[in-house]
Image (cartoon, grey):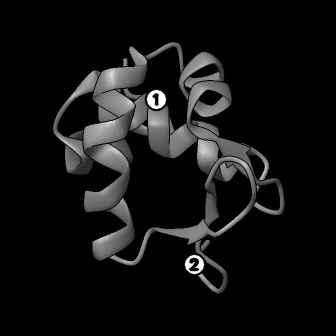
């Protein structure tokens, strides 16, 4: 059975990347710190720490300089 999100799953290449992107775009205006995003995506925080810079470089998420921890949110203008 093909789900509506099947193309996104294929593009992400792994279940962890898919969960991370899904968590970011489920609440596109919310900003998450790394551990909160890892918990929302049910992905290991170490793996999220490696994936977030790659997603930011690709323009899929934005890093926000927040204190005491950097936060991330879905890139604006992408839906």
Q: Quadrant of the N terminus?
A: top left
**Picture coordinates of residue 42, whole percent (x, y):** 52, 13
Q: Which residue occupies the foreground of this view, 11 or 56? A: 56
**Picture coordinates of residue 44, whole percent (x, y):** 39, 14
State which quadrant residue 40 falls in. top right
> In the displayed structure, would residue 67 be above or below residue 14?
below
> In the displayed structure, would residue 24 be above or below residue 15?
below
Residue carrying label 2 = 78
Q: Secondary structure at mark 1?
A: helix
Residue carrying label 1 = 19
Q: Secondary structure at mark 2?
A: loop
> In the displayed structure, would residue 29 be above or below residue 35?
below
- The earlier-in-sequence mark between 2 and 1 is 1
Q: Which residue occupies the foreground of this view, 63 or 28? A: 63
Q: Residue at x 44, y 69 (%)?
A: 60
Per the model, the C-alpha gap separating discs 2 and 1 is 17 Å
Q: Label 2: few (<14), some or many (≥20) within 10 Å?
A: few
> Is residue 52 toward the left or the right of residue 50 in the image?
right
Q: Residue at x 37, y 27 (%)?
A: 2
Q: Label 1: few (<14), some or many (≥20) within 10 Å?
A: some
| Tag shown at residue 58 | none
State which quadrant residue 39 falls in. top right
Q: Which residue occupies the foreground of this view, 41 or 63? A: 63
């Amino acid at each position: 059975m093909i789900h509506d999100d099947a193309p996104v799953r294929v593009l992400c290449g792994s279940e962890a990347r898919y969960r991370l992107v899904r968590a970011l775009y489920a609440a596109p205006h919310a900003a998450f710190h790394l551990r909160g995003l890892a918990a929302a995506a049910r992905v290991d925080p170490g793996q999220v720490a490696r994936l977030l810079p790659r997603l930011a470089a690709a323009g899929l998420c934005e890093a926000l300089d927040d204190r005491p921890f950097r936060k991330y949110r879905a890139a604006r203008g992408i839906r």
